[in-house]
Image (tube, rainbow, N blue to C red):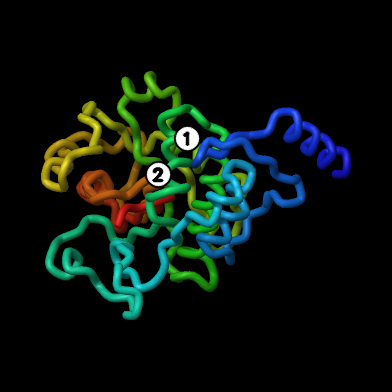
Amino acid sequence: MILKRLYTSIKNAVFPPRCMACRRLFTRMEHAIGHGCNTEDTGADSFRKLMAPFVCDDCLPQFTAIESPVCPKCGMMFRERVSDDHLCGECLTGVRHVDYARAIGVYDRSLMHAIRAFKYKGRTQLARPLGRMLFELYGRCYGRGGDLRTPPDLIMPVPLHRRRFRERGFNQAYLMIKEWPGLMTTGHAWDSHVVRDGMIRKRRTKPQAGLDKKRRKENIRGAFAVSADTDVKGKHVLLVDDVYTTGATAEECARVLRASGASVVDILTVARTL
């Protein structure tokens, strides 16, 4: 351990990392870096602990956790911070295929920059800390002391079209949950199975960024299918993705899963927009 810390100190002194948010060089001592998983940590705790090797001291505090009051169904955080959790207008009046959605933090500043670096600049080293943050959220949602929801039967990444996969070289949603089976233990909340190709993206769509809510729904309609070798009948399925924006992608995936017989569909994301 002492040799490892010495090596890290020398490496950081000679080759200091750049902050994933502001791109400035910075140094971080080994003892300041968190490595473990603790499902009792809050979203802010997880971000500080797991992103410390990648984000400087000035940018680490620029993280806003998703906290109550939120909509208990879709997980939207209300701008008014003095009320209790309550259903949002869309969940009160509309039909949602997703039963339950939660995210770690607001998609802005340091978290937004980290996700963009991971997704668009190939910084795949961020898959582990972001995946651990999601795993801790999973534990808070389905483990003891959390929302106490029944653990899902299947965990699936939102899929990429094969052409987009070839261009990017990886599916960021899958990389974040790739190590989850090794973190899980038998017993309450940890009996879920990660299914890498449970869903497929059968049609390439335009990028959702820049489209309004109506156009996002139209753009994504009919883009997904359940894999022929994946049985979701009567199953509780958990989807995982990087960002929840309008919910169009999540809703379309959930609609397809429900049409194939899934009984419950949830989604967890690293970030969501307000």
Residue that label 2 marks: 242
Residue that label 1 marks: 118
Residue 149 in view: yes
Identity of the residue drawn at 34% across and 31% down? 160
Looking at the image, residue 6 sits to the left or right of residue 213; the answer is right
Q: Is residue 268 above or below residue 116?
A: below
Horizontal and vertical percent for residue 132? 56, 49
Horizontal and vertical percent for residue 62? 48, 54
Q: Nearer the viewer, mark 2 or mark 1?
A: 1
Identity of the residue drawn at 36% across and 56% down? 236
Name the residue type under label 1: Phe
Name the residue type under label 2: Asp
Quick one: 70 or 183, which is closer to the camera?
Answer: 70
Q: Quadrant of the N terminus?
A: top right
Q: CA distance from mark 2 to mark 1?
A: 10 Å
Number of numbered labels in the structure image = 2
Quick one: 58 or 262, which is closer to the camera?
Answer: 58
- For label 1, the SS is helix
Residue 238 in view: no
Horizontal and vertical percent for residue 274? 30, 57
Q: Quadrant of residue 65?
A: bottom left
Identity of the residue drawn at 17% across and 64% down? 90
- For label 2, the SS is strand
| Label 2 or label 1, whichever comes before in sequence order | 1
| Residue that protrudes farthest toward the right in the picture | 2
Q: Are marks 2 and 1 in contact (CB under 8 Å)?
A: yes
Identity of the residue drawn at 59% across and 41% down? 54
The dot on residue 19 is none
Looking at the image, residue 204 sits to the left or right of residue 134; the answer is left
